[in-house]
Structure formats: structure tokens, C-alpha cells
Image: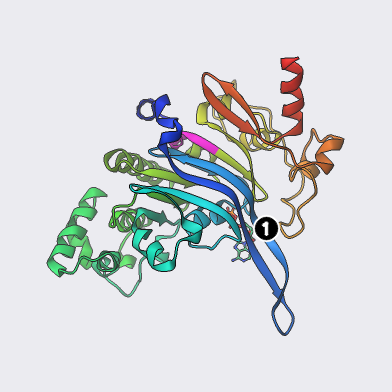
Amino acid sequence: MTDQHQNQIQKGEYGDQNILIKVRGLKTWYPIRTGLFKKISGYVKAVDNVDLDIYRGEVLGVVGESGCGKTTLGKSILQLIKPYSGEVRYQFHDGEKNLCTMPKEKLDNVRNKLQIVFQDPYSSLNPAFTIFGSMEEPLIRFGMKSKSERRRKVAELLKEVNLPENYMERYPNEFSGGQRQRIGIARALSVDPEFVVCDEAVSALDVSIQAQVLQLLIDLKKKRHLTYMFITHNLSVVEYISDRIVVMYLGHIVEVADTDELFQHTLHPYTKALLSAIPIADINQRRKRIPLQGDVPSPVHPPNGCPFHPRCPQCMEICKRVVPEPVTQIRNGRSHMVCCHLVKQQSEKETV
Ligand SMILES: Nc1ncnc2c1ncn2[C@@H]1O[C@H](COP(=O)(O)OP(=O)(O)OP(=O)(O)O)[C@@H](O)[C@H]1O
């Protein structure tokens, strides 16, 4: 987290009155259909019983190995995938509403507030359309009838992402990856969102371009008072941009803490293993590598007890049977949540 960034998040901003999104008991299970009649024979439990608060104005990083449910969580919050059960309560100006039970027409009316930037901007830019053609589409959807007004808006948006306005006449294939990602960001911002999910938004870019796009995202967040959920495999990127980090494993949240706290006082054995793999140039600072054995188990038949127990170097008997409850430690007035029997036992010993 940068100093500039740290200054932006005042401790008081994390109070209950500043929660933008409350996720409660969220389950997103993909049905598995088999046989001639496509009967449901099981579920891929991609997100399983997730509770999470997202605060207005923060950058919330989401990390975890491939297949842990990061994208499914982001898309479920945005209602791009309908959750199986649970709540996503969004704080609107006129009160809190559950997006999961909102009728489609109402949801369509508030969609502008919730946007996503994908890794591959091609997915949101039609190669057959000019940039103006792609960018005017959400503006039309949200009621901007006049074409000259839309041209003016697209020009403004391109300027905001540091691209010349005449680029609106060109086609996506005429741009580099970094330029296309800037256009993807401009398109997501065109409808004045409050909450933006950045799903591996810089992962496909060269390192030098990544830094520029990250800085652009930070600048835009500050200027437009945005809230980001930043999903990535890249722990160095997430450390740089996030105020808080959520660690996911097999559809569950296993640890949540402020970025510095998570890196300095890592509690969950899974997070320890993930962080130990970050390359560090300074030989004196290098952490001991904790190798992760095997692969993430199938979310169709997740293990009993702690989802991480089959791979955990510190697994105990209880971990094989009982799902660990969240334990919250408070340090410097800020909470650090972890789901781990070992940490729970250690904290209980310390308080005796
Ligand atoms: N449409 C789908 N139908 C069935 N299973 C799916 C679907 N989309 C994702 N999954 C499964 O859900 C689980 C979580 O996937 P998800 O893409 O959310 O994880 P992720 O952490 O974002 O992974 P990655 O980093 O590779 O994108 C995986 O086991 C995946 O195979």
C-alpha cells in the first residue's frame, strides 16, 4: 500500500456507517447436469457461505489460487451470476437493498453503479465497432439520447484515461494491450459507477504498462470516489494497490486483514504459503518458501472440516472434522479475521 493511499483511508472510514456492500451467507453453486433430461446431479460449490463487508472508498484485494472462486465471488456480487442463496446488500442513497432478490427491471436500473473491468478488454469491445460504437452503447442504455452529447462524453472519458479523443474513430485491433485496457476502463466508468470489480485487470500487460494502468486506476478511484474489488493472482500487485486483502480458498474466505497487517502478521497456513512464494529481490528479506502440496481439491466434493486441511502442513485432528469458525484478532484498533483451528487454539492459550 502506498503512503498516499494510506492517507486516503482514515480509520474512521471503516465504521459500520461506511459499509457499501454487505455479503451474507453467499453461496454460488453451479449445477452439474447429466443424462438425457439434464437432471441436476451435483453442484460446483464455487463460492460457499461467504460473509464479507466492503467499505466505501476502499480497494479490497482478493487473492487465492486458480479455481478458488475469486471471479465467481466478484460476478455474484454484481449479479452477473445469480447466487444459489445468500444476500448481497447494497447501500443505496435511499437505503440498503438486497441485489439478489431485486426484480430484473430494478436491477437493470441500478446496474450503472456496479461495473467490471476484465483481464481481456476484447470481451467488452466489439472488434467490428469503432471505439465510439462500443463506448456509446452503455450511454444509450442509461438514457443519453443525443449523439452529440454521447460524442462529447466519450471524448471526455478518453481524456480521463489519457488517450486522445480522435481514438474514438478507430477499431480495437489498432491498439496495444495497455491502450485497450484504458478503453475498457473508460467504458466501465462511462455510466458513473460507485463500485468496480477489476478482475485480473492488469495481469495480461507487460510489467511497465501494468504500473501505468495501476496508477491510472488509483488516480481515477481518488478523483471519482470509487470502491474497487481487485481480483488477482499477483500478490505484489495486490500488496501495492489494496487497503485490505481477502484470501480465498476453495470457495471460502480464510483470512481478511489490512494489507500491511496481512503481510506482517500472516495467520492462516494457506496465506503463509501463498505469501512465501512472492519473489523478493533483497536476499536478506527473503521468506522461507512453504511449498503447497498437491492441487486445490474439487469444489464438487470439498473435504469435510477445514477446506485446506488435506494440504495443510499444520493439520490437526479437529481440522479434518469441524469447519473452523471465524476468529477475529484486533491489532491497533483494526480487525484481522481468520478461519483456522490452530490460530483459535493459540489465541485461547494466550488469553488464559
Ligand atoms: N460456469 C461455470 N460452470 C461450472 N463451474 C464453473 C463455472 N465457472 C467457474 N466454475 C468453477 O468454479 C470454481 C471457481 O471458479 P472461479 O473462476 O470463480 O475461480 P477463480 O479463483 O477466479 O479462478 P481463476 O483465477 O483461474 O480465474 C472452479 O472450480 C471453476 O472450475
For the record, the magenta segment spans 239-245
155 shown above or below 147: above
The secondary structure type at the circle numbered 1 is strand
Q: How is the image coloured?
A: rainbow
Residue 179, by quadrant, is bottom left
Q: Nearer the viewer, residue 218 or 37?
A: 37
The residue lying at 51 percent from left, 31 percent from top is 259
Crowd rating for badge 1 (residues with CA inside 10 Å; few <14, some 14–19, many 20+): many
Q: Residue furthest right?
A: 317
Where residue 70 appears, as percent x and y from the top left, is 56, 51
Q: Residue furthest front?
A: 94
304 shown above or below 31: above
Residue 240: say if magenta.
yes
The residue lying at 35 percent from left, 71 percent from top is 127
The residue lying at 69 percent from left, 74 percent from top is 33
Q: Nearer the viewer, residue 285 or 309?
A: 309
Q: What quarter of the picture does the C terminus occupy?
A: top right
From the image, tell me which residue sits under label 1.
45
Where residue 251 appears, as percent x and y from the top left, is 65, 51
> Can residue 192 be seen here?
yes
> Can residue 286 be seen here?
no
Residue 236: say if magenta.
no
Where residue 130 appears, as percent x and y from the top left, is 26, 70
Q: Is residue 345 left or right of residue 334?
A: right
Q: Quadrant of ligand 1?
A: bottom right
Where residue 295 appears, as percent x and y from the top left, is 73, 50
Q: Is residue 163 left or right of residue 176?
A: left
User: Disc 1, ligand 1: is the CB inside 8 Å?
Assistant: no
Q: What quarter of the picture does the N terminus occupy?
A: top left
Going by the numbered disc 1, the residue's amino acid type is: Lys
